Structures are given as structure tokens and as C-alpha cells.
């Protein structure tokens, strides 16, 4: 059973990723100063549309790609500038990767794909065979484990990919759109399997997805948009960690999209608000305050305001 812990497993600070533009085009900023942390045994989903920076973030957190700036600490050790020679054994022994396509070796059966992974990690041949068989049986692949990948369904391919990822008993699994090629039924089965493995083996899971339904299986979800974290939901969410990255989004039609936790605070003062732009300097801000012109009673307790623009004398609500 997964245990609750405050011990940090993975921590990224001020992560930037910048790609050089092609043929004189502007550089592409994929990640914009992200701060993210995972605890041991935690199940986290990164949610966002295509181009939000999800896959880039996963590759950087897993040591597959270097950030342009910022640091990644895994078990407290900075891996962001570590040499590939030192990174390889860390990835093989403590991190499991799962990708949308599965990335299985096509000439090997599902069983042999898992055995090959264990052999690369230094495990003896007989032990690797027994472990691969045991894991594949646990994942419901007993009758199909010796089939080649092209004969397996999408759900079966992902089960083999999961078996390969967990075979070394990693502390963390990073999964990039693991249900992207699956239908609704197989998606449900694979996500239930992730949930069970998370609880049984106390493995931390970080899943990148565009699906809110897939994200609902996680303990906590982090919303990513245009390379920035714009929201967190679920157990362990740190609202205050979003102070430097939250955005008020204005659509082409002029509508405002506000963070849900801000709406909760605003609604306690009523639904009528005045907004103004502060354009001083290089950091424009939107300023909002309850509109006293819209009502003469307190928006919280509905008692007369008696002309006070700052506090309700009946319930103490702050009005400005």
C-alpha cells in the first residue's frame, strides 16, 4: 500500500527549456521557470494540451534532456548537469519509462523484451527469466507473453511496457501519454492497473496526459499551459507555489478566465467587481476590488454598509 510521506523524491526548480528556432525563426520557449516537486510514493498527473510543454518536462525530470536553466534534484542529488555516464545507471536502477508507442523491440516477444531490460541492469539470466515471467503473469499477460509485439493489441503492448518499466523495482515511473493510442475500455484497464501497482508496490508515478479523465486517477494533477503551471488540484496541492506562475487569461473576445481558488475568495464578497489595469513598468497587472456601486448591502451578510467602503460593521467582511 502506498504510504504518505513528506520526503522529497524529485524536485525541479526554475526549469526553463528553450529550443533554437529554425532558419532564423524566433527561439521557442517550451518551459518558463517551472517549480515542481514529487514526494516518495506520490501519484501525479501533468495535464495540458499539445504544445503545453508536458513531454519536455517529463524528459527533463527523467534525465533524458538537459534544461536550458534550472536544477533537477533526484533523491537530493542534482542531475541536471550530470554526465551521461553517471546518469545511465541512475535511470536503469531507479526510474522506469513508458511511452505512448510502447517502444518495444519488434523482433523480441513481450517476455524477451522484459528479460532484455533486466539483463541490461546486470541481473543474472535465470533470475531475469523468472522475474519477467512473474511480472507478466501479474499483469494478465500469461497467455500472450511469448507473442511478438505486432501480434499484441494496444492494451497488451502497454502491459508489456509497464512490465518492463517496473521490472527493476524503480522508485519512480515516468509515463508519457501511456493511454494515447488506446480506446476507452483499454484506457480504463491500464489506468486501473497503474493505480493498483502504485498502491501495491509504493512506486511514485508521474503521468503526462491531455485527458482530464486519465488525470483523475492520480492523487494530484498539475495543469500546464504554454510552458507554465497554471493550476494544481487534489491531495497535496500547494496553491502558494503558484504565485509566480499563475495567469489571468483573456480570450480574443475579452472574457477573463480566473483560477478557481480565486473565484472562491471573490464570491465571498459578492459577484460585482471592478477591474482596472496597472500598466506601470514592465509587469502589467489586473487589479480587482468589490464594486460598492453595485450594492448598498454587505455581499456576505446582506446587512446595510452604512457608507463604510472598507469593512462591514456587522460581519467584519473586508470590502476593499
Image (cartoon, rainbow, N blue to C red):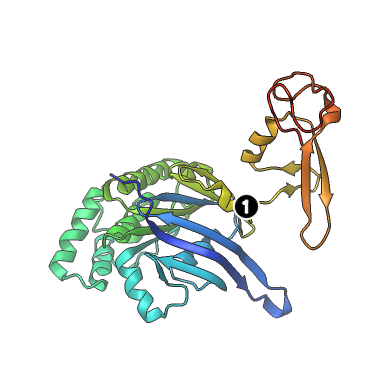
Q: In the figure, is residue 157 to the left or right of 57?
A: left
**Residue projecting furthest to the left:** 126
Q: In the figure, is residue 292 to the left or right of 104?
A: right
Looking at the rendered structure, the secondary structure element under dot 1 is loop
**Residue projecting furthest to the front:** 313
Q: Quadrant of residue 97?
A: bottom left
Residue 280 position, x and y percent, is 83, 58
Residue 147 position, x and y percent, is 27, 58
**Residue projecting furthest to the right:** 293
- The answer to whether any part of residue 131 appears in the image is yes
> What residue is pinned by disc 1?
243
Report the residue at 47% width, 73% height from top: 80
97 or 202: nearer the viewer: 202
Report the residue at 81% width, 28% height from top: 308
Q: Quadrant of the N terminus?
A: top left
Q: In the figure, is residue 176 to the left or right of 107?
A: right
Residue 264 position, x and y percent, is 64, 34
Query: Is residue 186 positioned above or below 106 on the image?
Result: above
Q: In the figure, is residue 240 to the left or right of 73?
A: right
51 or 286: nearer the viewer: 286
Report the residue at 16% width, 71% height from top: 124
Tell me how many marks there are: 1
270 or 225: nearer the viewer: 270
Query: Is residue 91 positioned above or below 208 on the image?
Result: below
Amino acid at each position: 500500500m502506498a504510504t504518505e510521506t513528506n520526503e522529497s523524491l524529485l524536485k525541479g526548480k526554475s526549469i526553463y527549456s528553450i529550443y533554437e528556432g529554425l532558419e532564423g525563426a524566433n527561439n521557442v520557449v517550451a518551459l518558463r521557470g517551472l517549480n515542481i516537486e514529487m514526494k516518495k510514493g506520490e501519484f501525479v498527473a501533468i495535464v495540458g494540451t499539445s504544445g503545453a510543454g508536458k513531454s519536455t518536462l517529463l524528459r527533463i525530470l527523467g534525465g533524458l534532456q538537459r534544461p536550458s536553466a534550472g536544477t533537477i534534484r533526484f533523491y537530493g542529488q542534482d542531475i541536471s548537469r550530470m554526465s551521461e555516464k553517471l546518469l545511465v545507471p541512475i535511470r536503469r536502477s531507479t526510474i522506469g519509462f513508458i511511452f505512448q508507442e510502447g517502444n518495444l523491440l519488434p523482433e523480441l516477444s513481450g517476455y524477451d523484451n522484459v528479460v532484455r531490460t533486466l539483463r541490461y541492469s546486470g541481473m543474472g539470466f535465470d533470475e531475469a527469466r523468472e522475474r519477467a515471467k512473474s511480472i507478466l503473469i501479474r499483469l494478465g499477460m500469461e497467455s500472450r507473453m511469448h507473442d511478438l509485439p505486432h501480434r499484441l493489441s494496444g492494451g497488451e503492448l502497454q502491459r508489456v511496457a509497464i512490465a518492463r518499466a517496473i521490472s527493476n523495482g524503480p522508485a519512480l515511473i515516468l509515463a508519457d501519454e501511456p493511454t494515447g493510442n488506446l480506446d476507452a475500455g483499454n484506457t480504463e484497464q491500464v489506468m486501473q492497473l497503474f493505480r493498483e501497482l502504485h498502491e501495491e508496490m509504493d512506486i511514485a508515478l508521474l503521468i503526462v496526459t491531455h485527458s482530464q479523465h486519465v488525470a483523475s486517477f492520480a492523487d494530484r494533477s498539475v495543469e500546464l499551459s504554454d510552458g507554465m503551471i497554471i493550476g494544481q488540484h487534489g491531495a497535496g496541492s500547494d496553491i502558494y507555489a503558484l504565485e509566480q506562475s499563475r495567469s489571468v487569461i483573456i480570450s480574443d473576445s475579452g472574457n477573463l478566465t480566473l483560477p478557481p481558488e480565486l473565484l472562491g475568495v471573490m464570491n465571498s464578497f459578492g459577484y460585482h467587481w471592478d477591474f482596472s489595469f496597472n500598466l506601470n513598468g514592465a509587469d502589467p497587472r489586473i487589479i480587482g476590488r468589490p464594486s460598492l456601486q453595485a450594492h448598498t448591502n454587505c455581499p456576505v451578510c446582506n446587512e446595510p454598509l452604512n457608507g463604510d467602503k472598507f469593512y462591514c460593521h456587522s460581519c467584519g467582511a473586508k470590502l476593499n
